[in-house]
Amino acid sequence: MSLKQARKLYVLERLCENRISNREAASNLNLSVRQTQRVKSRFSKPDLDGGISLVPLLTLLLGLPVKTAVATSLVAVVTTSLSASSSCIRKGLTNIRPGLFLETATTAGAVAVGIPAAFLSKKVPAVVFAIIAFYRAGILLS
């Protein structure tokens, strides 16, 4: 890594941690504020969803059952989302009404799917997850 790349990485890390403003980062990177915002969004955007990469690791490497791995993945994703959303709420970047509607719909969907899933064989969640994982991989690769 060159010195210029290391400096850019340092500035972007500070920007993502909200230790410097977009304007300060733009002047340090010799970019416009809009270009800096675009770079920040690409820099902070994960390459893969947590569940897509976490479930296979838990099942293949640690030998956990698929249901346990999916539940663990959901807990990790929800925890990460909650910590990020609390920061956005404090900054006033979040519209609470649609968030509450989506939260209610998500909870209802989880209950509607979770109850029947408890009575399915162990292979059904694995097959469904595999289909979704291959679909998401196709999207990421295209």
Image: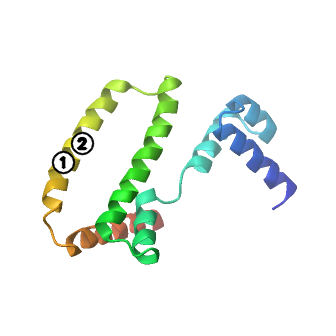
x, y percent for residue 125: 24, 68
Bin the neighbour count of mark 2 within 10 Å (Cα to Cα): few under 14, some 14-19, many 20 and up: few
Q: In the rendered structure, which amino acid carries the disc numbered 2?
A: Thr
Tell me the quarter of the picture where residue 21 sits.
Answer: top right
Query: Foreground: 65 or 18?
Result: 65
User: Is 35 rendered above or below residue 74?
Assistant: above
In which quadrant of the rendered image does the N terminus lie?
bottom right
Left or right: 18 with respect to 48? right
Answer whether labels 1 and 2 touch (C-beta < 8 Å): yes
In which quadrant of the rendered image does the C terminus lie?
bottom left
Marker disc for residue 107: 2
Q: Name the residue under label 1.
A: 111
Q: In the rendered structure, which amino acid carries the disc numbered 1?
A: Val
Give the SS element for disc 1: helix
Query: Residue at coordinates 40% horizontally, 66% vertically from top-left?
Result: 55
Cα separation between marks 1 and 2: 6 Å
Query: Foreground: 114 or 44?
Result: 114
x, y percent for residue 107: 24, 42
Query: Residue at coordinates 49% horizontally, 38% vertically from top-left?
Result: 83
Give the SS element for disc 2: helix
Left or right: 137 with respect to 45? left
Bin the neighbour count of mark 1 within 10 Å (Cα to Cα): few under 14, some 14-19, many 20 and up: few
Query: Residue at coordinates 64% horizontally, 45% vertically from top-left?
Result: 39
Left or right: 51 with respect to 24? left
